[in-house]
Image (tube, grey):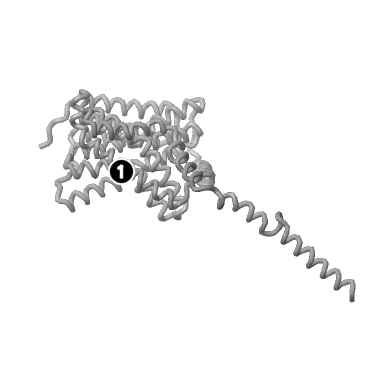
Amino acid sequence: MAPPQNGGGGDLLEAGLLAAAPNGGGGKQETASSPKNKRPAWRRAAAQLREVFLGTRLFPLFSAVPLAVAAEHLRLGRAWVFVFSLIGLAPLAERVSFLSEHIADTAGPTAGGLLNATCGNVPELIIALFALHKEKLEILKWSLLGSILSNLLLVLGSSLLLGGLANAGKEHPFDRDSSESSSTSNDDDAADNTAIGFANAVIWLIGMAAVMAMLSNYVVTTIEEASESLGIPVRFVSIILLPIVGNAAEHAGAIIFAFKNKIDITLGIALGSATQISLLVIPIILIVSWVNGIPMDLNLNLLETGSLVMTVFTTAFTLQDDKWHYLKGFNLTLCYVVIAVCFFTIKALPSK
């Protein structure tokens, strides 16, 4: 009876020594988590600043934000305020998209999808609300129309063109399942490597949206005087230039995925954004205008209506055979250039 008793005691002693060892049991977990707990606050703040401001290739354009504020307060001219504000909106739009996706990853599929749908078109929505507040209804309608045209023709067309050339110019069938799974794994890796937590991402998102609202107010306030000073029609600026800046983040993302031969993600970005403008932003603007008693309508003239109809049919015919080629992207991009030239050369008639 003695040997089994000693063996049992030896086993208990051995288990106790293993549990007390630095690398045994919970010791490894404690050492793994201790560096994060002992990390200074200023290092965490520096990591977040680096992630937010230097985590995009558009970070040099952030310098336009203080320049826009300085030009406004020093009264350097409406054109300078407009140009700097327009440039500063591009990196802000990209960072808002990045932060909203990071929040959506931790908020769950339902809340995350709603957040992405709302924040995906924050620049267009903010500019539209300021234009509605100042009752610049023509600029409002032109900017919303331009967002749809830009997504369906410029974003999709340039992505198909550059992606087709990068992939030897061959036709490729859509591979939706593999593209979506690759996109999900890439997003998960990015979420794991980010230095921003959920609460900090919400704070950064609110701050970025506030700065974007300030620049959008500058743009809407100065667009007419700046257009006259620069010799560019207001309708061209509203339909062509404003959407290009607002869609800068989506445009860059769509081209990157097209280069990687993930065309289904590119289609989701371009077509999804155009759908959100049509079914989310425009109804919100109409409801807000109705509540505030502003006579907002969607009465477009012949050129604007024809451009929208031609864009929808051209995109539909381009995508109907489930294959993509760089020439299809060239056709869409060329169609956008033709529409831009028309809006630049043909003078807009005054609204009745």
Q: Is residue 142 left or right of residue 186?
A: left
Q: Examine the image and state in which quarter residue 300 appears.
A: top left
Q: Under tag 1, what secondary structure?
A: helix
Q: Residue at x 31, y 29 (%)?
A: 336
Q: Is residue 341 above or below residue 18?
A: above
One can see residue 314 in this view: no
Q: Residue at x 73, y 57 (%)?
A: 21
- Of residues 176 and 235, the one drawn nearer to the viewer in this rendering: 235
**Count of numbered marks:** 1
Q: Give the class, few, some or many, for how many residues have Cα within 10 Å of label 1's Cα (few <14, many ≥20).
A: many
Residue 219 lies, in percent from the top left, at 25, 35
Q: Residue at x 47, y 35 (%)?
A: 257
Residue 248 lies, in percent from the top left, at 37, 34
Q: Is residue 135 left or right of residue 264?
A: left
Outermost residue toward the bottom in this view? 1
One can see residue 107 in this view: yes
- Of residues 309 and 117, the one drawn nearer to the viewer in this rendering: 117
Residue 169 lies, in percent from the top left, at 48, 25
Q: Is residue 192 left or right of residue 32?
A: left
Residue 351 lies, in percent from the top left, at 12, 36
What residue does disc 1 label? 277
Quarter of the image with the C terminus is: top left
- Of residues 205 and 315, the one drawn nearer to the viewer in this rendering: 205
Q: Examine the image and state in which quarter residue 224 appears.
A: top left
- The amino acid beneath tag 1 is Ile
- Of residues 159 and 77, the one drawn nearer to the viewer in this rendering: 77
Q: Residue at x 36, y 39 (%)?
A: 93
